[in-house]
Image (tube, rainbow, N blue to C red):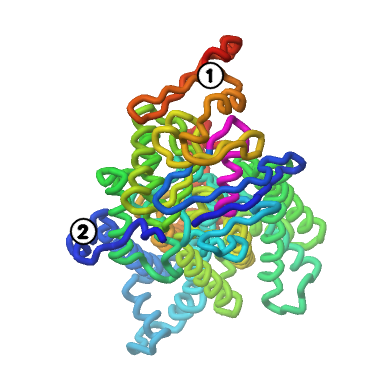
Amino acid sequence: MATRVTTPRSTELVVRADALGIAARRRRSLAWLVALVALLVLSVLVAVGVGAAQVSPMATGRIVLHQLLGVGTPDWPAAREAIIWDVRTPRVLLGVCVGSGLAVCGMALQAMVRNVLADPYLLGINSGASSGAAASILFGIGAGLGEHALQASAFVGALAASVLVLLIARTGGRVTSIRLLLAGVAVGYALYALTSFLIFASDSAEGSRSVLFWLLGTLSLGSWGAPLAVVAVIVAATVALLAHSGRQLDALALGDETALTMGVDPNRLRVWLLVVVALCIGVAVAAAGSIGFVGLVIPHVARRVVGSAHRIAIPVAAVMGAIFLVWADVVARTLLAPQEIPLGILTSLVGAPFLLVLIRRMQVSST
Amino acid sequence: MLRASAISYSYGSMLAVDRVDLTARPGRVLGVIGPNGSGKSTVLRCLFHGLTPDSGEVSIEGRPLSSLSARDIARLLAVVVQENVGESTLDVAEMVLLGRTVRLSGFRSTTAADHEAAAEALERVGATHLAQRPLAELSGGEKQRVLIARALAQGTSYLLLDEPTNHLDIRYQHEVLALLRGLAGDLGAAVVVVLHDLNLAAAYCDDLVLLEQGRMVAQGTVDEVLDPAVVQRVYGIATERLDRDGELHLLFRSVGAASTAGDLS
């Protein structure tokens, strides 16, 4: 019988334990994560205070603490508490959840299709969710599910769109990144048209406004309730699952065959990822409409900061996505106040130039 | 022992591998050779169930691969395939450490022992100085060594490689094969390597399997398989064999000179 090729010798462990600088890097990444979480908390407090009635982050913090833990005595007007706690806090929290969800889904898709241009929005998954949600509202599909009908049908729409994109990309042989991307763009446009048509055809007075909502996204519907709880739980579970599968994602990003030699079944992993991503995007879109480019931009920034090992890059992207969307929403609310700008306009303003830079950097070989 | 018995594989209606038998033994380097399209890479893929043979069986230490999961297989044998991982944004240390994936349950982080195994693998391929570099920046030879280190970090007794010398300069070709030779010699690993270059195969392998159109036409020691008459027939090129200082070399003449082949052999 052959001996093992590598046998750790315990005597050398202490001396050479960090020969590769891995422990040092891990500490650095954790420091980044902690700093970003702190920044997120601060961002949330500032964002909740911003609006027609300005409230300082300190005062906001006291109100939030009082609501959460019953700490402190309320010496503030009840109206302010209502604005802070009932109106703005759920809105900002929705931003946190949706931003995280979009960012980690983008990162998972990029590993899955091995292309830095992958993003739920560009791959048509957001549009699928929009169509599902619109169909649910207009035709009462899934009404038996009560207040979760919207989320459920958005999930089904997202899943259907991603399966459709995969199938189209697969016809005629190997799935290449370019085929996948083009299929995504095509399916995305078709479903956009479908969503808009459904809404206008329904003859609803709110028609055009709803179209704006589904196509460009907004956090204005964020409120305390079961749907927000569902978004929070599903996004948190998605982040945890993806971080937990970080090494599998690393392996998949290297190539199907390489992944297999490392004991990762690429096909099973892809199916599983697709379901998780569709679920997460489904509930995010049902809550906030289709917000583009977060899943494209944030993963890149996250990888720049902590490298591309997914175990750490996923949680970092989640926190960065949350911070990004919270601030995007602040700008959306204040730039033309009292009028609100749809969030997707702002994310596209940041994302589209970013996409151009990425395309410029793409080499011919990566197609 | 890694053994394939009568494995066959077809791509659609094209039979690529036709009832091939081979055995890889600890401490030995087995070369798989043959002209383009003879099924070398397909045989290798069958050996780790990257492709599942249509018929026949592959077994490792007496256990059929069909009874093992992808994870079980990866714990027993490591593979370096020809897949372009150059686009990866991982750095070398992360890449090599990924080889430890099969030894870890999902929630566990890599431990000092894993880092040690990865460092040792990198040292063995002489690439410790590259640890902090991004994979994408490495030269072909450096990249290949890192990929082998990744496979070594998996800590298996069996190592399969698909044309590891492809696109490498002559010096790197010899370096990589000397490295494999060392793994078999020092560590008793069983190495199976698909090779294009017959002289490299002659210099570094113990045993060879020669394929032609999916069929095995010869197998045995290097000396037995590299019969110039057989090589000449299979590759369609005039072949002369020199045995010098216990080393075996093949000389080739272009096809235009094939009419004089009789004199050469």
List x then y, in percent, for residue A216.
61, 54
The residue type indicated by label 1 comes to: Ser
Q: How many marks?
A: 2
Spatial CA span between label 2 and label 1: 56 Å
Q: Tell me the SS state at disc 2.
A: helix
Image disc number at residue A16: 2
Mark 1, residues whose alpha carbon is within 10 Å: few (<14), some, or many (≥20)? Answer: few
Q: Which residue is mark 1?
A: B265
Image quarter of residue A266: bottom right
Pick whichever, A318 or B35, lies toward us.
Answer: B35
Q: Tell me the SS state at disc 1.
A: loop
The span shown in magenta is B33-49
* Residue depicted at 45% across the width and 54% down the height: B158
Q: Are marks 2 and 1 on the same chain?
A: no
Which of label 2 and label 1 is nearer to you? Answer: 1
Instruction: Specify whether residue B45 is painted magenta.
Output: yes
Task: Please report, as a chain letter, where disc 2 is located.
Answer: A
